[in-house]
Amino acid sequence: MEAMSYREFRELHPVSDEAMARAQRATEELILAYELKEARKDRHLTQEQLSRNMGIGQKRVSALENGRLDVLKIDTLRRYVEGLGGTLEITAQFPDKRIKLV
């Protein structure tokens, strides 16, 4: 069996631009969740300790750290970041300007 190039594979298994964009967003969410988990671990906090600091259940912290960012409220993310000693900043990026939202 001869090896197949990536281009050949894509020709045999086409993927829509929409599907690629969804996969890209999902990957970015998993990376962000991993970075948040590592920030918590760097501060030697368990999910339980952080959840108490935030005033939410440990399951919500776990969901956040496992990439369930699609249902995340900004207030929960703000409390997570503040629970680690940080400050949440949210910025809208436009071609001609940036607007700091939070």
Image (spheres, helix red, strand yellow):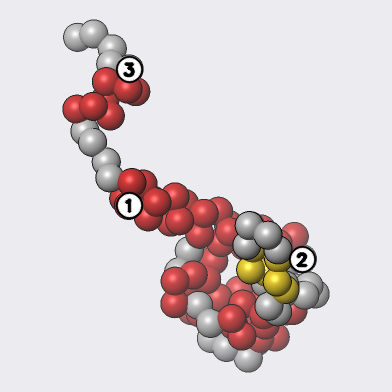
Task: Determine the image quadrant of residue 76.
Answer: bottom right
Give the residue at mark 3.
Answer: 5
Q: Which mark is residue 18?
A: 1
**Farthest front residue in view:** 96
Q: Is residue 5 left or right of residue 69?
A: left
* First in residue order: circle 3 vs circle 1: 3
Q: Amino acid at mark 2?
A: Arg
Q: Amino acid at mark 3?
A: Ser
Residue 74: % across, % down: 59, 81
Q: Helix or strand or loop: what does disc 2 sit on?
A: loop
Q: Helix or strand or loop: what does disc 1 sit on?
A: helix
Is 83 drawn above or below residue 25 in the view shown?
below
- For label 1, count other residues whose C-alpha is less than 10 Å away and answer few (under 14), some (14-19) or many (20+): few
The alpha-carbon separation of the residues under discs 3 and 1 comes to 23 Å
Residue 10: % across, % down: 28, 29
Give the residue at mark 2.
Answer: 43
Q: Is residue 88 left or right of residue 35?
A: right
Looking at the image, which is closer to me, 86 or 83?
86
Quarter of the image containing the C terminus? Answer: bottom right
Is 74 drawn above or below residue 33 in the view shown?
below
Query: Which tag is nearer the camera, tag 2 or tag 3?
Result: 3
Residue 60: % across, % down: 51, 79
Task: Determine the image quadrant of residue 95.
Answer: bottom right
* First in residue order: circle 1 vs circle 2: 1
Quarter of the image containing the N terminus? Answer: top left
* First in residue order: circle 2 vs circle 3: 3
The alpha-carbon separation of the residues under discs 1 and 2 comes to 38 Å
Residue 61: % across, % down: 55, 75
Q: Amino acid at mark 1?
A: Glu
Q: Is residue 61 left or right of residue 52?
A: left
Q: Helix or strand or loop: what does disc 3 sit on?
A: loop
Query: Which tag is nearer the camera, tag 3 or tag 1?
Result: 1
